[in-house]
Amino acid sequence: MLAPDMVQLDMTGPFEVLARVPGWSVSLVAATLDPVRTDRGLRIVPDTTRESAAVADLLVVPGGAGVDSAMLDTAWIDFVRRQADSAEHVFGICTGSLLLGAAGLLQGRRAGGHWQARDLLTRFGAIPSDARVTVDGKYYTSGGVTSGIDVALRVVADLEGEVAARKIQLAIEYDPHPPFPGGTPSTSPAEVVRAVQADARARRAQREDMVAQAAERLRQP
Amino acid sequence: MLAPDMVQLDMTGPFEVLARVPGWSVSLVAATLDPVRTDRGLRIVPDTTRESAAVADLLVVPGGAGVDSAMLDTAWIDFVRRQADSAEHVFGICTGSLLLGAAGLLQGRRAGGHWQARDLLTRFGAIPSDARVTVDGKYYTSGGVTSGIDVALRVVADLEGEVAARKIQLAIEYDPHPPFPGGTPSTSPAEVVRAVQADARARRAQREDMVAQAAERLRQP
């Protein structure tokens, strides 16, 4: 799915993996057919709308501020519930797992999410996981942004076999060497963690508020 | 730059990093303002055209089949030469380094590229590098697809300091755990390497032909 102000790499990372599986096709679903402006300005053209979207085998829900707003949008909640109900596998990338939670799909399940947001999953009855890839039944959830690539390779391995996944991993030369150790709060210097948290303070407060509202709606629909 | 049939993650990976640097802005340049269809169907809306693009501090050249075609397109060659001339830093991601080579920018320089194409850099007088990130003067070149994320973090560290790069690395939770060892020919099982090479045989032949033509033009402009 594509929502305004989503994080584009939450979707484009998994897209690159999933679209390379022989026989699979990826369809980008949005509210309308107009280009969707993601949070840092990249604009992506949807393939179809929520109303016209075919029933998918695999639903991918990215994260970001726009996906927080979708928690309070019944058109998105209905779409996610309907697609997740018939999908064989459901992805929540980064804070996308919050939308799955808001749709009532993660109750009693283990689920991951961006390290700055995953604690909020408890508000939807989920059990937060710190793992980069968390699988609970048909729900595949990930940590922040870039972990969508890892979770996509994992689902390809589970559905199409290890050789299929390894071929894609080699084709996209996914042998990452981040320039620094880090990438998680526990492996980053304390000053870096504090700086990222400070930058995101307003965003976090807004997200807490939206999660609280979405959780209330889930209790009293 | 955006070219039809490029590999979208070559651009969207670095985009996610570069667009997060305070004070930096990213502009997507294409031949026209129409959405650009990338090789697996994702459509991206350009911000500007080659003619209207501002002089950039940093030029990012992604790879893929469409960028091979750009090697034989004087409008792209002229654009890349002009922008590279004034840019402080130039990125070639994946097979994007071939376009830099075709523009005559890598003569005598060390440069990386996708493992299935980097040997062709010799045709443009460059010295192929197997490293995931290769820096030679202002030219930052990378291995295949996903390595664009690593090279983007590296340039942020070089220009804005290590803390700025580590903040972005943590914000996008870039602590990758590919599901399998691999991602390079030397770390993947031989059957996987052979399968990927077999799938790409026609593409490779086409690319060799285009590189030969582009190299000929470079010798006799």
Image: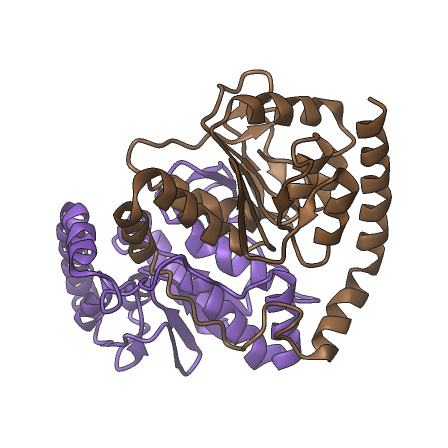
Chain colours: A purple, B brown
Answer whether residue B91 is visible to the viewer in this image. yes
Question: Which residue sits furthest top?
Answer: B52
Q: Residue at x 12, y 51 (%)?
A: A205
Q: Residue at x 15, y 63 (%)?
A: A216
B85 relative to A75, above or below = above
A29 or A10, which is in the foreground?
Answer: A10
A10 or B158, which is in the foreground?
Answer: B158
Answer whether residue B31 is visible to the viewer in this image. no
Q: Is residue A28 left or right of residue A8?
A: right
Q: Is residue B152 left or right of residue A19?
A: left
Total marks shown come to 0
Q: Quadrant of the C terminus of chain A?
A: bottom left
Q: Is residue B131 left or right of residue A126?
A: right
* Residue A150 spot, x, y in % from top left: 47, 69
* Residue B23 spot, x, y in % from top left: 30, 31
A20 or A5, which is in the foreground?
Answer: A20
* Residue A120 spot, x, y in % from top left: 19, 66
* Residue B89 spot, x, y in % from top left: 49, 33
A44 relative to A158, above or below = above
Q: Quadrant of the N terminus of chain A?
A: bottom left
Q: Residue at x 50, y 76 (%)?
A: B179
**Quadrant assignment, res A191:** bottom left
